[in-house]
Amino acid sequence: MEKTEIDQTRAPIYEALEKFREMRVVPFDVPGHKHGKGNPELTAFLGEKCVGVDVNSMKPLDNLCHPVSVIREAEILAADAFGASHAFLMVGGTTSSVQSMVLSCCKHGDKIILPRNVHRSVINALVLCGAIPVYVNPEVDQRLGISLGMSRDQVKKAIEENPDAVAVLVNNPTYYGICSDIRAIVKMAHDAGMLCLADEAHGTHFYFGESMPISAMRAGADMSAVSMHKSGGSLTQSSLLLIGGNVSERHVRQIINLTQTTSGSYLLMSSLDISRRNLALRGKEVFRKVIEMAEYAREEINAIGGYYAYGREMINGDSIFDFDPTKLSVHTRDIGLAGIEVYDILRDEYDIQIEFGDIGNILAYLSIGDRMQELERLVSALAEIRRRYKKDPAGLLSQEYIAPEVVCSPQSAFYSNKKSLPLNESVGHVCSEFVMCYPPGIPILAPGERITSGILEYIEYAKAKGCSMTGPEDPDINNINVLL
């Protein structure tokens, strides 16, 4: 397909499914519900149109593992829309995109430079391939208790001390909307003969909005995992993996096929196809409105008093090189409430579901489906919560990031012989599993890291405040697995 042929008004997977629907094909293949006829309750719940296109791969609809027609066309259109050399449709969530990205360039024993405040999917990939993490500890905003981006000097130092590393990974942006200087980091990585990878799970809109931080592909990154379902409007679990010209499309496809299903969901793939078309045609206009709503909400929330909805005023040119203007991140600690407490009150008493609350902050995720009247409802609720629940913040923890002591690789720790200990007896031992609040899914402890009293204090505090803790074998997180 030549560049001149690319037409962003097309949605080839959607178009093929519509044609397939008209054919009234008799299905003697999977899935077993047979266009919904075998599962009337499911059909009543989801609708005949939905289950009717929940179909298996076949010649007219192509095959995700080896696309040659409509899926291939959809990938080419996505690559053009995102400014990439190639784009892969991913149906295992951005977790599968991140893991395929890491596995494409790292093998057992390879070093990869990355910030410690990565999503667990990155460290999961290291468990799978046996690569060695070289952590760049992010700077911390002490007032907000959040980890920031990677400073240029820290990345430069990590590269100089580890010239044998194969890649540098960057969050673009963090969950809170903070961006590192990805263009400079790309140059440093390339000058050292390393690849630069980007976790853009929360940066889909960077590719389409105006007045946005730079996208990874535009900054020259080699690979990027883009979570289309977060701010791009596609169905949950659909994602894209983008690559630049220095990466082999065929090799990456082989890596993807190691772990991704051979039964790709046409519901997810068509949602990626339709959403890409929508963003390519209307993205600038849509995200201009999202930024306007976020700016309005920031002003109104800051006018309440006690809260701090932070934005571009935080930019310092390095560890906060830029800020995502669509992110409505709000510090709550000064009204005497942990973010998770405000999160719970909003849901339980105001029927407002925000993205997450941590120890000191909440995040309301704004994207293409939000409306101004809903934001006004959120602002009013926050004002009422301050009036009804405000108390002395003394005694609240604020530190969100704890620098880890890495004793061994995530893979060796995860697969080593281990024993279960009560949390309060685990200080000094090396953890063999994950502990995290989800969301955001950034590990408090990862396999191979030493357990300290400060980490245990943080875990117990987060549990007491009601954070959703995940990771360990023990669902109540009273015990933890450690190396023998």
Image: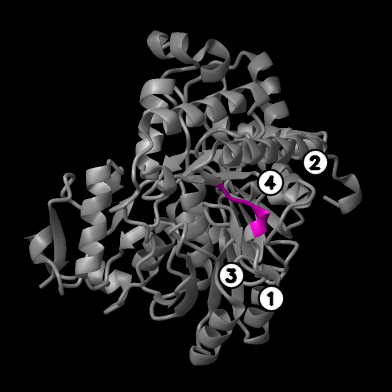
Q: Is residue 358 placed above or below 427 in the rendered structure?
A: above
In the image, 215 versus 396, the foreground residue is 396
Instruction: Name the spot of residue 163 as percent of width and height, x first.
Output: 53, 90
Give the Cα distance between marks 4 and 2. Answer: 9 Å
Q: Which residues are magenta?
A: 309-313
Under mark 3, the amino acid is Ser
Q: Up-down: is 193 above or below 417?
A: below
Kindly identify which residue carries mark 1.
184
459 to the left or right of 141: left
The residues tagged by marks 3 and 1 sit, at their Cα atoms, a distance apart of 12 Å
Q: Residue at x 15, y 67 (%)?
A: 482
Q: Which residue is mark 3?
A: 319
In three-dimensional space, the C-alpha distance between marks 1 and 2, rounded to whole angstroms, equals 26 Å
**Secondary structure of residue under mark 4:** helix
> Which element is circle 2 on?
helix
The amino acid marked with disc number 4 is His
Report which residue position mark 4 lands on.
205
First in sequence: mark 3 or mark 2?
A: 2
> Left or right of 435: which side holds 390?
right
Assess disc 4: are there few (<14), some (14-19) or many (≥20) residues with their C-alpha within 10 Å of its C-alpha.
many
Mark earlier in primary sequence (3, 4): 4
Q: Can residue 36 be seen in this snapshot?
A: no
Amino acid bearing label 2: Lys
Q: Residues within 10 Å of mark 3 (few under 14, many from 20)?
A: many
* Tag 2 residue: 284
Q: What distance separates the C-alpha of mark 4 from that of mark 1?
A: 21 Å
Q: Say if the magenta span includes residue 341.
A: no
Asked whether disc 3 touches disc 2, contact meaning CB atoms under 8 Å apart, the reply is no
> Can you say whether 364 is above or below 423 in the image?
above
CA distance for labels 3 and 2: 27 Å
Structural distance between the alpha carbons of marks 3 and 4: 21 Å
- Residue in the picture at 36% in, 24% down: 348
